[in-house]
Every structure is written in structure tokens, then in C-alpha cells.
Amino acid sequence: MRKFFLFTLLCCFLLYAQTSRAQFTHADSLRGTNGPARSWWDALKYDLHVKFNLNDSTINGYNVIYYKALQKARTMQIDLQQPLMIDSIFLIAYIPLRYDKYEPEKIAMPKQRITEIKKDGNAYFVDLPANQIINSTNYLIVYYHGKPLIAKRPPWLPGGLIWKRDKNNNPWISVACQGQGASVWYPCKDHQADEPDSAEMHITCPDTLMCVGNGRFRGKINNGDGTATYDWAVVNPINNYCIIPYIGKYVNFSEVYKGEKGDLDMNYWVLPYNLEKAKKQFLDAPRMIKAFEHWFGPYPFYEDGYKLVDAPHLGMEHQSATAYGNGYKMGYAGQDLSGSGWGLKWDFIIVHESGHEWFANNITTKDIADMWVHEGFTAYSEVLFTEFYYGKEAALAYVSGVRKNIDNKSPIIGSYNVNDDPSERSTDMYYKGSNMLHNIRQIINDDEKFRNILRGLNKTFYHQTVTSKQIENYISKQSGIDFTKVFDQYLRTTMIPTLEYKVKGYTLSYHWINCVKGFNMPVKINFKKQQWIKPTEQWKTLNVYPEGETNFSVDNNFYVITKKLQ
């Protein structure tokens, strides 16, 4: 997820809007399409072995890609971004389904070296010796090396490796690759629609440093040459871009949270000079778990634990190993993005990035064009966290305050099958998405039902990849209200619905303009008293008794515009 530091990035987004990608390249299609060389196989597990060479900023190693054949096919697309290069690929076929119990170097089965490999930009098309047998479980060993792309301003695009030093001049290394893609540092099927069901990381680096990874620590091997290999593993499905190493001079402290599914191990890996600050700042972590388990249901990765890790960039939702770089300040690096004051009551990176464990890591969109599902819900998690601890008025002040960050220069949903990331052009998937969800909550007008919808989403789509339409349909079905036009309005256009109205005597006339055809969103208004109206594109009237005030306004919980006619 990309966080947007308001004062420094508004100009960047204006530039993005002016250079919006009207055309897409062949490379965009190769990256963004779940095409015939991808769709026939299901990634089961990545077993990643990588050595980080600090002296020349290179990496080398191999990825064991376990997969299941869904159809008969033989051409497989493997992604690895230049200037990294694949050295060789070996196939071992027809191993038993319990792939997690095997180690490729110890299996007494013949390796078949793949010689027919066609490179097309960052995609390698691997011709296997024969059509794969449907439902067979096989694996490739992909050896590679090179000097990977360097992230220029992590965690934003362009992403890549981060080679830095901490305040004590110790090496501090990580990766930030959302949008850029995990293939910037290891070979994989670089598409959100297919997550490996589990993953292992075996990271080699100087033995004077510590490597922290996703999931559980499984051990350290001293190699006797000044390096050590650190083994980490997750047993749950994981987004490609969330598989991340952190290499540095880390120290650890931990706690156990008594959550909805039992004991949750919470570990904090920080640089030594941040230890005392972290013990105070990270008190927001169990507070976050308490609030989000209330709203969203159990933390989705109890088996892999929860971690916050000091990172050489602002932050990112790396599953079970959240990157933290907020400077141990409240708000967003000390700023309140809402301007309400409530955003300074909690640490933005802890709350927002951890919210992604439910929306992005548990529920992941198949296509990056639908990333509002990640960012809109997670931006709204900031509102829900505020409400949980500070009340509804505080939450309203926060959600209405962030509306100033909405620019409406491009639709929230991008183009499908071409790796079109809408956040390159606008922040609207965050705070317009959040305000749309707040609108929907008002219309449902039952907070317990709304909370059950949020929890139901995380249960129904547990550890799944989804489309926006699936999420939209679920909300409409569970609420009993057809929100089709609301989703079309806020996700697929740049128009802010405008309630045009006029008051003559004690009669209010009103209708929607600047909206999609058939837009019929009800709103709560103040006109003598607080009440609901159901505007359409056609004029309607409302008569009131002659006593009392006739000043008109739409309730501030709704993200709309009002326009008074004389």
C-alpha cells in the first residue's frame, strides 16, 4: 500500500493525472493478464533461497516453485525483472501432493533441465518437455542472479531493493515492491490472482546481522564463511509482494495477545537505539488488534503470528511482518491527514498497515485495477479505529476531514488485464473509497448489520482472491439494499453526486444531478428536522409545517455536493 504524505506528494499526483496512461504496452499486458501461460497452473508454494551480497549490491539464488496443473499445457510464464537474469531452470514432475514435506536437493528423482526458454522483456516463457498431467503436483527450480533494481523512493514506485545504513552505519536492507512486483527480486508468477498457499524464505547475509521475514522463524545456519542463513516460513496463502526480508542489526521483544482465536504471538523487531521508543509506541499494536477483531473478525494469520519490523522506508503491509518507518510519531509522520486532530491520537502506520492484514492480505484482489478493495476498506479502518476508542463524533470528524484529499481526476477502478495501478494517478482509492463506505453504512442505518457485513466479508472470502464485483454484490446481498448505482458512481466515475434543490415557502424540491443514470442514493437531511429523502434524477418535493426553521443541509456523514437554485 502506498501512503501519501500530503504536503510532499500532491504535486506528484497532479503530474500523474496529467500523464495518465491512455495506452498500454505489450509489457503491461504480459504483466497484468492472467493469460494462457499462467492460468493453467496454480502456484502452491514458493521456497526461496537468496544470498544478499552487500559488497556489490547483487543477489543470487533460486526459487523452488511448486505448482499444480489445472489443465493440459506445457508453456509456463515465469516473471523476473531486468537486469536480473535466469541462469537455468529444472523440472521435477509428479511428486506427491504433500509438497511441503520435500526438499528439492534431497529428492531422488531426476531433474530435467529446461532448454527451451523464450524471453520477452521481463517474462520468460518456459516450454516444458510435455503437457502436464491434470492435477499433478510438480515443481521448477529457477536459478538466477544479478543486480536488482533499486527503489528510488520507497515504498512508492518505482520499487525495488533498498540498500541503506542505519544511524550506527550498520547495513539495513529490505525490499518495497508493491506495484513494481515481486519479480523485481525473485522469479515467480507475478500476478495477484494466484497466491502461493505457503512460502519459505532462506536468506543468506553477513552473520553479524539478523534477517527477519514473514511468518515464523525456523532457525539459523552459520555457514562458516562470515555469513548465516535465516529460515522463515508462512503456512498461509500470501501475496507475492508481501514476501519480504528485513536485514539489519535487529533486537526483539514480544508479547502474547489473547484474541478471538486464542493466543496471538506479537513480535517487534527494531534497531537497538529504537528499543525504548518502540516499547511505548507499539502499545498501539494490541489496541489495533482489539479494535479490528471487533470490526473485521479474527486476525487472519494466527498461525504465522504478527510482527512490526523497523524498515528503511515509511511502511508497507507485508503479511505477518508489517514494515514500520513512521519515526515513532503519532499520526502520519507527525501529521494528521484529516486535519481534525483525531489523527494524532494514534500511529497511522501501525493502524493502516495492520488493517491491510484483513483487506489486502486476507482478501486480495485478482487484478490491481480493483485495489480500492485493499485501500478503501483499510482507509476506512482508520475511521473505525477512531470510533472504537474515541466515539462516533470523532470518527465523523476524521472521515469528513480526509475528504479534502480527494481530487476526482480519474476513476478509482483502473483498466483490467494491463497492470494499471490507479494509485499512480490519484489517492482516491483511499479516501474516496473510505467515504463511499461511510455513505453505505449510513444507508444501511444499522451499525451491527454493517459490522456483521465487514466480518462476513473476511469469513466468506477468507484467504481468497476476489474481484470488486464480488465484494459489491456481497454488500448488496447481505444488506438487502441494491448499491449497484452507488458503486458505479463512486468507483467508476469522477462525478461527485450533486443534490440540486430549491426552497419555496415551506416546500423543498430536490433531485440528483452529476450522476450515473438511475442514481437513487437516499440521504439524510436537515430541513426543519432530521429526516431521510430518496432523491432520483427526477424532481421530487417535500412539504413541511410552517413552524420552525427551513434551512436546508445534507447530513455531513454523506460525501455529496449540494447546489441551491433560486
Image (cartoon, rainbow, N blue to C red):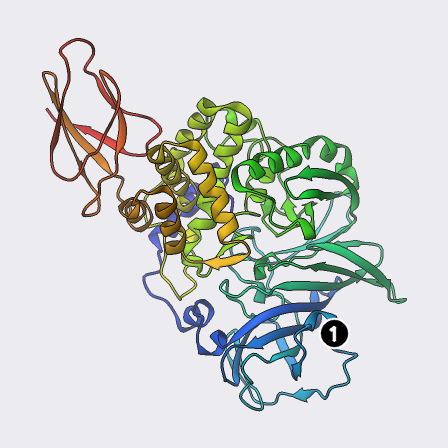
Residue 412 lies left or right of residue 280; in this view the side is left
How many numbered circles are shown?
Answer: 1
Nearest the viewer among 506 and 337 is 506
Q: How far from the left and from the top, in percent, is residue 245?
A: 69, 57
Quadrant where the C terminus is found in the figure:
top left
Farthest right residue in view: 224
Relative to 392, is 179 above or below? Answer: below
Relative to 130, is 518 above or below? Answer: above
Q: Is residue 328 visible?
A: no
Give the residue type that dot 1 points to: Tyr
Q: Is residue 251 visible?
A: yes
Q: For the point 57% across and 87% down, which residue is it? A: 128
Residue 487 lies left or right of residue 213; in this view the side is left
Q: How far from the left and from the top, in percent, is residue 117?
A: 56, 85
Q: How far from the left and from the top, in percent, is residue 190?
A: 53, 67
Report helix, strand or loop for mark 1. loop
Q: How far from the left and from the top, in percent, is residue 347?
A: 60, 33
Label 1 packing within 10 angstroms: few (<14), some (14-19), many (20+): few
Q: For the point 47% across and 74% down, which residue is it? A: 39
| Residue where numbered disc 1 is placed | 102
Relative to 286, is 27 above or below? Answer: below
Q: For the point 57% across and 89% down, which residue is it? A: 116
